[in-house]
Image (spheres, rainbow, N blue to C red):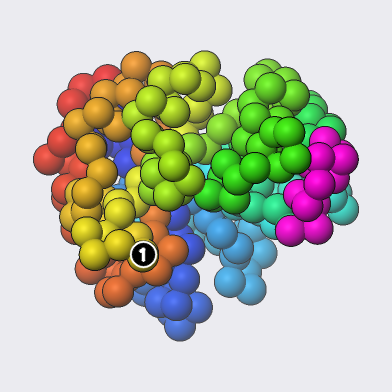
């Protein structure tokens, strides 16, 4: 992992972005971040968001886009991401209604392949971001097993979240190694020592030496700082970047 491979998922600082997007992004750039992953545009057009990012010396490397937008028009999703300058279109989660049975999950998997093909046709890449529910039993399988076995690796990459891997009962480094050919990006957040929530990367109990070594071996393109439940969002993303820089080694 190099310093220029560390990005920030803007969902982590969503409240600050909602109050003052430009000022918040300026603070992010001042911390040393040069890349972000978007999760919505806070009422701006893709063109306006791109202009703000360019002005501040930031680039959008990927974007989390809701399930319903992919279902409605993956081509439009790709067009907006091309305007942003992003390389990856990421499905961040799926509705419970699409994963309650094996039949529903297999229909979802078929859609992942279809959306991946539509995104690939535009020159971008499609990736799936998981939580812990993918590892829960689903009749004779799990949603995770269906995704990794029944989607086309050329169409559906993985954005592997190390915190959710651990929460789902898996060793994050081992999971990265097992799917090394598909891990395009890693989400970096830690497991709070007190349990029950996430923590800034480097301030919890995860084995970062093993995780980052696995990421390097897999050739992950981006290491993305993220938290779902930050205590002090701007402080947390600053500390997480600093902690990861202390562990960074040349790829």
Please state the horizontal and vertical placement of residue 22, each as a whole percent of the image: 43, 71
Q: Give above or below for 17 relative to 138.
A: below
Please state the horizontal and vertical placement of residue 127, each as a whole percent of the image: 62, 36
Q: Nearer the viewer, residue 221 or 189?
A: 189
Please name the residue that numbered disc 1 is placed on. Answer: 197
Residue at horizontal 51 percent and vertical 21 percent from the top: 179
Q: Is residue 193 visible?
A: yes
Pick out the residue farthest to the front: 140
Task: Locate residue 140: give its quadrant.
Answer: top right
Q: Quadrant of the N terminus?
A: top left
Residue at horizontal 81 percent and vertical 47 percent from the top: 101
Residue at horizontal 37 percent and vertical 34 percent from the top: 171
Q: Is residue 8 visible?
A: no
Q: Is residue 106 magenta?
A: yes
Please state the horizontal and vertical placement of residue 37, each as a whole percent of the image: 49, 50
Q: Which residues are magenta?
A: 96-108
């Amino acid at each position: 992992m190099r310093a220029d491979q560390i990005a920030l998922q803007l969902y982590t600082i969503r409240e600050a972005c909602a109050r003052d997007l430009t000022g918040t992004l300026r603070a992010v750039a001042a911390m040393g971040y040069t890349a972000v992953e978007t999760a919505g545009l806070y009422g701006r057009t893709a063109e306006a968001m791109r202009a703000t990012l360019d002005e501040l010396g930031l680039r959008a490397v990927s974007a989390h886009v809701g399930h319903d937008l992919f279902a409605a028009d993956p081509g439009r999703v790709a067009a907006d991401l091309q305007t942003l300058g992003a390389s990856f279109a990421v499905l961040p989660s799926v509705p419970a209604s699409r994963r309650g049975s094996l039949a529903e999950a297999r229909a979802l998997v078929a859609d992942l392949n279809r959306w991946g093909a539509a995104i690939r046709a535009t020159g971008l890449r499609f990736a799936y971001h998981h939580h812990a529910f993918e590892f829960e039993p689903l009749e004779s399988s799990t949603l995770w097993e269906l995704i990794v076995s029944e989607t086309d690796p050329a169409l559906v990459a993985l954005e592997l979240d190390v915190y959710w891997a651990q929460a789902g009962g898996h060793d994050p480094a081992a999971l990265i190694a097992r799917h090394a050919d598909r891990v395009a990006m890693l989400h970096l957040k830690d497991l709070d020592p007190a349990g029950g929530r996430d923590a800034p990367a480097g301030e919890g109990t995860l084995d970062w030496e093993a995780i980052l070594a696995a990421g390097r071996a897999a050739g992950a393109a981006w290491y993305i700082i993220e938290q779902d439940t930050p205590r002090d969002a701007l402080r947390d993303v600053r500390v997480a970047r600093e902690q990861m820089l202390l562990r960074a080694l040349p790829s």
